[in-house]
Image (cartoon, rainbow, N blue to C red):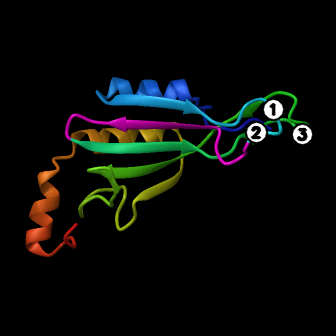
Amino acid sequence: MENEYKPMTAESVGEILREAGATVQVRSGRSESYGAPREFSFEVKAIFPNGMGLHVVARQFNYRDPWEAAGRVNDVVDAMLLKNGALTPLPKGFRWFQGIDEECGLDEQQLREVVSCVRDLNPKLYLLQEMTGDLPPG
């Protein structure tokens, strides 16, 4: 059964982040060998010019055929938000990372929205919302 999601690779996720102006590191995880760890199939780390970062992980392959002979893909990824190297939620008023530091199960379009949001964020919002009490000091 064909999935409506577009498959993502370490390279395609890295390219999305580079196009947004981030400095990117890419690492593949699980190899073609069944003896390799199954924790993730790839991860991509990115730092934007505003100092914010994203750690994008594809934790498992989805299989599009019953015997795993072909069609191993990553349709969704998880993204963790980083500020000064530490996990953080976004200030109030954003669609993503509200009260959480990880968004799970993002398809490519949602990942692009998250990347745009993080890229365009003014980190001074953290200080402002800490001062107004809308965000705990961090």
Please tell me whether residue 98 belongs to the stretch shown in magenta. Answer: no
In front here: 106 or 102? 102
Amino acid type, label 2: Ala
Amino acid type, label 3: Pro
In front here: 109 or 21? 21
Magenta stretch bounds: 37-50
Q: Is residue 1 above or below residue 85?
A: above
The residue depicted at 72 percent of the width and 46 percent of the height is 38
Residue identified by numbered label 2: 36
N-terminal of the pair, mark 3 or mark 1, is: 1
In the image, which disc is placed on residue 66? 3
**Mark 2: few, some, or many residues within 10 Å (few <14, many ≥20)?**
few
Quarter of the image for residue 41 reads top right
Q: CA distance from mark 3 to mark 2?
A: 20 Å
Q: Is residue 79 above or below residue 108?
A: below
Q: CA distance from mark 3 to mark 1?
A: 18 Å
The x and y percentages for residue 13 are 49, 31
The x and y percentages for residue 56 are 48, 42
Quarter of the image for residue 23 reads top left
The x and y percentages for residue 11 are 53, 24
Query: Are discs 2 and 1 less than 8 Å apart at CB?
Result: yes
Q: CA distance from mark 2 to mark 1?
A: 6 Å
Please tell me whether residue 47 belongs to the stretch shown in magenta. Answer: yes
Residue identified by numbered label 1: 33
In front here: 77 or 30? 30
**Mark 3: few, some, or many residues within 10 Å (few <14, many ≥20)?**
few
Q: Quadrant of the C terminus?
A: bottom left
Q: Would residue 110 be visible to someone looking at this image?
A: no
Local secondary structure at mark 3: loop
Amino acid type, label 1: Ser
